[in-house]
Image: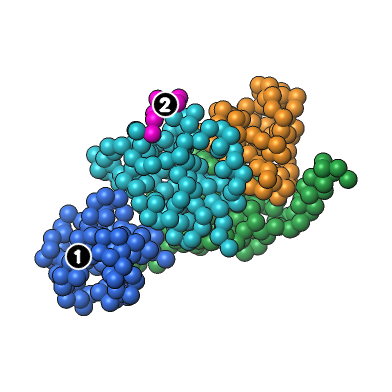
Chain colours: A cyan, B orange, C blue, D green
Amino acid sequence: MAKRILFLLNRAPYGSSYALEALESVLVAALFDQQVSVLFKGAGLHQLLKGQDGAAVGQRTVGKMLGALPEYGVAGLFVCAPSAARLGLTEGDFCLPVTLLDHDGQRRIINEQDIVTG
Amino acid sequence: MATLHVLNKAAAWTDCEPLLGPGDAVLLIEDGVYAARQPLSVDVPIRALDPDVQARGLSGQLAPNVELASFDDFVALVVSHDRVVTWSQ
Amino acid sequence: MPATDKEGYLLDLADWSPEVAEQIAQREGIALTAEHWRIIHLLRNYHAAHDLSPAMRPLVRRVRAQLGAEKGNSLYLLRLFPGNPAKVAAKIAGLPRPTHCL
Amino acid sequence: MGLWGLLYCRRHYASLLAVVVSIAVHGAPYASAAARTALGFVESALRLGHRVHRVFFFHDAVLLAADSVVAPQDEQDMQAGWVRLQQTQGIELALCIANALKRGMLDEEARRRYGKPAATVHAAFTVVGLGQLIEAMMQSDRFVTFAG
């Protein structure tokens, strides 16, 4: 029986390997046929910015890897709307189609999960 | 469907607080216990992990609605909630 | 033949060329045909777009989307790249070892 | 019995029921308290009769498994408690292989495969694929993440 797993991603890419390593676990959860969704909050929104080039700092490009999520079967891509407002970001800044959620929406999504992790 | 929110940094309170709902509970651990030095005015139960409170010299200085929790209480909280969200940084 | 690890993956991905692909394929006992090359190019484009060596399922999905249902299935890929198509094809295409093969 | 009574009962019985728990540890040893807090949690869970299916070390937490740790005499050895737990209770201590390799944490098999001079992972730990993290989530009633 598939579990509903939400990955709460709140780290910026490149400054540490957190974002990239967390993304690897998201991909594997999807390969295991779990119902996977992702919620970007705070500095994690920077993972979605267009025009990244990780090669400039010898790393893989997180923004490009995120583009593989739909094909891996990750259905829910959510962004914390208050975080976006605070950072001055809008949907046009993101490299993927995402659903913006206010606090009520985030609470609702979290309450649907079996597991929430980072 | 209730959630246990575990905070290990005081600053994580800002992220966590707006998402608290009925039936939820908060557990402050590690540097999260510093959040309880200020009044935390929410409707959900708040606990702070006792060894982390003691280590930081905060015994007797916590907001009045914050209760101490042992590791056994930590486990009981995890078991009695449907899921655990860990808030860091 | 440029340096590879013990399983035959290129140590430096920049060493890849079509000639190197032929050599790696030979070691795997595969004679590359136009059909193989379509998959190899698709894989290299996938990697350029996503910085990932795709696992089997996303690979099949991508092949189906670009080359049609007749080729977008695991049997077709198994026939071209026997054993573990996601791994074998990635090796020949000069991609990193797929890290999440099940 | 009112709604609150029902809720209370649900909570009360849940706390008596034995559940299967898995955890992930994300924080580096010493740079964070994650491994210490997680150990306290797991010890309590076992004492209270719950089953711990797997402890999965991820990110810098894989460094906890270093085979050549020398703990200061006046500090708790963060690794020793985990090793004891594995040896006495058979708890599975799993390291994420992708995170472990790039941090120089190799078991004997990885040492041989990559031709490195020494294995560096303590025998109480096993090096596994990320699939084992997801399997732990699938097999457990509760999953707790100990962040850095």
> Measuring 47% from the left and 36% from the top, which residue is drawn there?
A100
| Vertical side of D60 occupied by D140: above or below | below
Left or right of residue A66: residue C10: left
Expressed as whole percent of the image width and height from the top left, the position of residue B46 reads: 70, 33
Q: Which mark is residue C38?
A: 1
**For residue A3, what is the image quadrant?**
bottom right
Left or right of residue C93: residue D16: right
**Amino acid type, callout 1:** Arg
Give the magenta range: A85-91
Number of other residues with Cα within 10 Å of mark 1, as a class: few under 14, some 14 to 19, many 20 or more? few
Q: Are marks 2 and 1 on the same chain?
A: no
| Label 2: chain letter | A
> Measuring 67% from the left and 25% from the top, which residue is drawn there?
B40
Q: Nearer the viewer, mark 2 or mark 1?
A: 1
Determine the CA span between mark 2 and mark 1: 43 Å
User: Could one spot residue D83 in this view of the protein?
Assistant: no
Expressed as whole percent of the image width and height from the top left, the position of residue B29 reads: 63, 36
Q: Label 2: which residue?
A: A87
**For residue A85, what is the image quadrant?**
top left
| Label 1: chain letter | C
> Camera-side residue: D129 or D72?
D129
Name the residue at the right extreme. D1
Number of other residues with Cα within 10 Å of mark 2, as a class: few under 14, some 14 to 19, many 20 or more? few
Left or right of residue D125: residue D91: right
The N terminus of chain A, quarter of image: bottom right
As for residue D132 lying within the magenta part, the answer is: no
